[in-house]
């Protein structure tokens, strides 16, 4: 029972609080600027199409996907998916999110190195996510410090993946905002709203890294106990 209710759970709780705050912030910011429509009357999918064609990208499909803020770009399929809360909407928030996903498509087309690195690290991150805890638990239960340490090492792959994700996401937002401004899709005051939406979204990735680092610290502390 000590393993399940030990004092390291405060690290998990702290990580959860950080993530919840970031998630609440992006949702409230998105909702706020979803009520502000862009003056040009552009829909998010129209803006995305314009951005992709302007970048010389003609082999990426734009599709609608259910949900809210479930927008993403799939490099393997070359599909840019916009959620119900973005696709067809003319809000400042919707255009900001659509442009951000276009930023990922442009990264892919231009061979952006951090995006390649993130894609290459997905298998290791998946392995780490699946095996880190089972190895740690077995190591503690069996009193095998080496097994517990192996679990910690595998979890670092998960943390590394999330750290690599940060420059990818920040760069996509920078590309998005530059394009929206250069092509006059949003006015100066509308750009302020788009920046706030994308900044709030970026903080969710920062929060994910912070939460994972706290979780990694907890694993290290638990692994050390198996050695004692």
Image: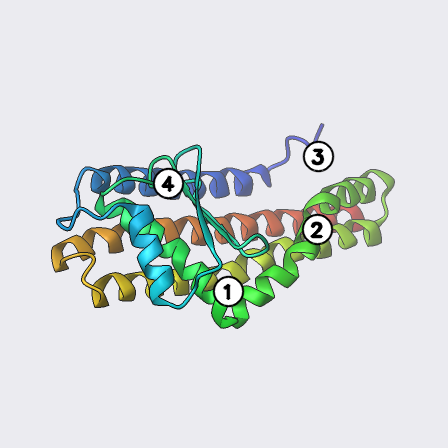
Q: Earlier in the sequence, mark 4 or mark 2?
A: 4
C-alpha span from label 1 to label 2: 25 Å
Which SS class for mark 4? helix
- Mark 1 lies on residue: 108
Q: Which residue is mark 2?
A: 128
Seen at 35% across and 50% down, the residue is 98
Query: In whole angstroms, how far apart are the C-alphas of marks 1 and 3?
Result: 44 Å
The label nearer to you, 1 versus 3, is 1
- Where residue 141 sits, quadrant-wise, is top right
What residue would you read off at disc 3? 3
Check disc 3 and report its element: helix, strand or loop.
loop
Q: CA distance from mark 4 to mark 1?
A: 31 Å
Residue 129: x %, y % from top left: 68, 46
Earlier residue among tags 3 and 2: 3
Q: Label 4, on which residue?
A: 21
Q: Residue at x 54, y 72 (%)?
A: 113
Residue 112 to residue 44: above or below: below
State yes or no: discs 3 and 4 in contact (Cβ < 8 Å). Answer: no
Q: Give the mark nearest the N terminus, 1 or 3.
A: 3
């Amino acid at each position: 029972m000590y393993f399940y209710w030990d004092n390291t759970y405060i690290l998990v709780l702290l990580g959860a609080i950080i993530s919840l705050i970031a998630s609440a912030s992006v949702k409230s910011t998105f909702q706020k600027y979803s009520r502000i429509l862009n003056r040009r009357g552009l829909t998010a999918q129209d803006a995305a199409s314009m951005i992709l064609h302007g970048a010389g990208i003609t082999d990426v499909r734009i599709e609608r996907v259910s949900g809210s803020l479930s927008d993403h770009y799939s490099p393997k399929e070359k599909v840019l998916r916009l959620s119900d809360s973005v696709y067809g909407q003319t809000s400042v928030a919707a255009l900001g999110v659509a442009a951000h996903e276009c930023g990922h498509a442009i990264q892919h087309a231009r061979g952006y190195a951090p995006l390649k690195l993130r894609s290459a690290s997905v298998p290791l991150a998946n392995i780490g996510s699946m095996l880190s805890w089972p190895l740690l638990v077995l190591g503690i239960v069996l009193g095998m410090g080496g097994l517990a340490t192996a679990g910690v090492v595998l979890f670092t792959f998960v943390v590394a993946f999330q750290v690599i994700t940060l420059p990818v996401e920040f760069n996509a937002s920078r590309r998005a905002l530059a394009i929206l401004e250069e092509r006059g899709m949003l006015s100066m005051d509308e750009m302020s709203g788009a920046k706030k939406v994308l900044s709030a979204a970026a903080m969710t990735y920062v929060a994910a890294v912070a939460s994972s680092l706290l979780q990694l610290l907890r694993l290290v502390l638990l692994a050390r106990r198996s050695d004692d």
